[in-house]
Image (cartoon, rainbow, N blue to C red):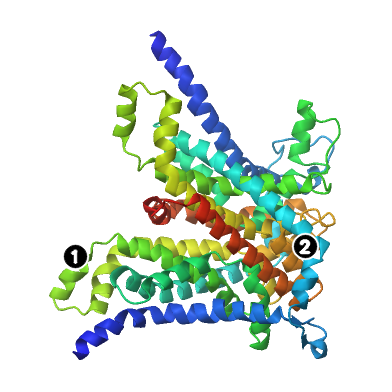
Amino acid sequence: MRTVKTSFTRRLFLLHLPMALIVLFAISPYLWMLLTSLKPEATLFSANRSLLPEVITLDNYIRLFAKTGFIKNLGHSFIVASGAVALGLSVSITAAYAFSRYRFKGRRPLMLMFLLINMFPVVLLIIPLFIIMKHLELLDTHAGLILGHSTFAIPFATWMMISYFNAVPRSLDEAAQVDGCRPFGAMLRVVLPVTLPGIIATGIYIFITSWNEYLYASVLAGQDVRVLTVAVQTLIGEYEIAWGLLTGGGVVGALPVTLLFMLIQKRLIAGMTQGAVKG
Amino acid sequence: MSHRSSLRRMPYWLLSPAVLATLIVVFYPMLQAGITSLYYNVLWKPKAVRFIGFDNYLSIAQDPVFWASLGRTALWIGITVPLQLLLGFVTALLLNQQFRWRTLARSLILIPWALPSVVIGLMWSWIYHPQVGLLNDLLLRVGLLNTAIPWLASPDTALYSIIAALVWQGFPFFAIMILAGLQTIPANLYEAAEIDGATTWQQFVEITLPGLKSVLVTAVMLRIIWVANSMDVIYVMTGGGPGYATHTLPLYAFKRTYSSMDFGYGSALAVTFSALLLGFIVLYLRRVGKGME
């Protein structure tokens, strides 16, 4: 009886309590933003402000959608992120298949190249990309920003897809080739369907990264194509910081990607850690 | 014969779209950055553009803001990454145990990872707000503070306030990577150690840490690169200010380029930063990654 009790206290102090504290640390900034967005703007700066809202109001959200171009911004973000997913996936699937299934001259240096690009400083690319897009008149267009985002989408997707393809046994494509499929046909008909969940997870992660991206979005676009992150940042300047509006924008802007992230986390993490765990 | 040679060419065909795309969007711009850095190139003076060799780099060597930003970048990485690692490690050790709300806890700690940097900057600026911020309110109420602190407006606290936000953003990555690593360590190693009478601490040092070595080396490297590069949170929270108090090297290169449209000097700064980062990573892998693979 005593041991049960001590082990319970032990677990409470060594497991449940610290875990709860860490979870609280992880979610409290977002919760605080959510709570703020539900309070009337006028009460935010009052002397007897309270932690929890005394009246819950959707006023900030109504203003956000009615008075600012927030819906348009969400639309731009959606177009750019979808474009980045399409471009990133379409060129990297075949590349990852080649890396996973073929042994050829230059394989290792090419793989290393894709790994290195993954780590490239944004600041090194963003300056020349600005000049190049200015010449091509691609500044402030969806296409230009999608190209900018492909700098991280392509190498990332390639690496993720290699690990998903590697998880599919080679015997599967060999069996298909015996059945008369050509190598490319084997990829289309046998390997792709099996790795579809991995492809979807990779696509969603590109979507999230592109949706969340700010620097390219503010430098390569920002006027005609004003995506959500740039819009939120501009709200800070334009309305001498209307915190109610701003926190509402933050909640709305972050919600879709947070939900998507929860949806794919298991598969995404499996793909990401596979390489690292194996060393 | 022709079938075999077409087979041999197959991987190159499959690779060509990705290689072509990266040549266009990554390597060509990179080359451009290198070239631009050798020019005097201020955007609104198109007629004054001229080749000046390494003059930009010579100016960098004498630029006090560059050296201050470099030092701050080292500080920025040197505090952020270890704190992320520590908090991530503790989180992973907790999540590696069996308890009923484990799945829920694991999902919730991922939230910082998923959020846009702009929203993160915004949230934390609101928490740090000098007059009505949550942090000041709480600290004043508990009695740890007598007067409110302007966290982001004071040069003494601004950098550390942003570091706290970045630790928050990055620890889930470490937690998840380390958790995955922990789960690959065979349980019978611990059972054997238990029989031999090893304490929990000994088990941690003798089994857990060696078992995690490759994961830790990789995760720390990825984070160093990521933290070194990440300037959007700083940009949103302080814009590099007050004064130069929160300028890191990439942010300085970025701001120098776009506020004064000085593309030549900005490119030279960006190239210098990239070279330093690459050198650091190579050094890190030589020292820490020794004996791996």
Q: Name the residue: 51% across, 80% down.
A: B23
Name the amino acid, label 2. Phe
Name the residue rendered at 70%, 55% in the picture: B73
Q: 10 Å neighbourhood of mark 2: few (<14), some, or many (≥20)?
A: many
Asked if residue B103 can be seen in this view, the reply is yes
Residue labelled with disc 1: A171
Q: Is residue A180 left or right of residue A75?
A: left
Say what secondary structure mark 1 lies in.
Answer: helix
Crowding at dot 1, Cα within 10 Å, few <14 / some 14-19 / many 20+, comes out as few
Residue position for label 2: B66
Image quarter of residue A73 = bottom right
Q: Which amino acid does the dot numbered 1 rest on? A: Ser
Q: Nearer the viewer, residue A58 or A202?
A: A202
Seen in the image, is A65 located left or right of residue B206? right
Instruction: Name the residue at the top extreme.
Output: A2
Left or right position of A189 against B215: left
> The residue marked by circle 1 belongs to what chain?
A
Residue B151: x and y, percent? 79, 44
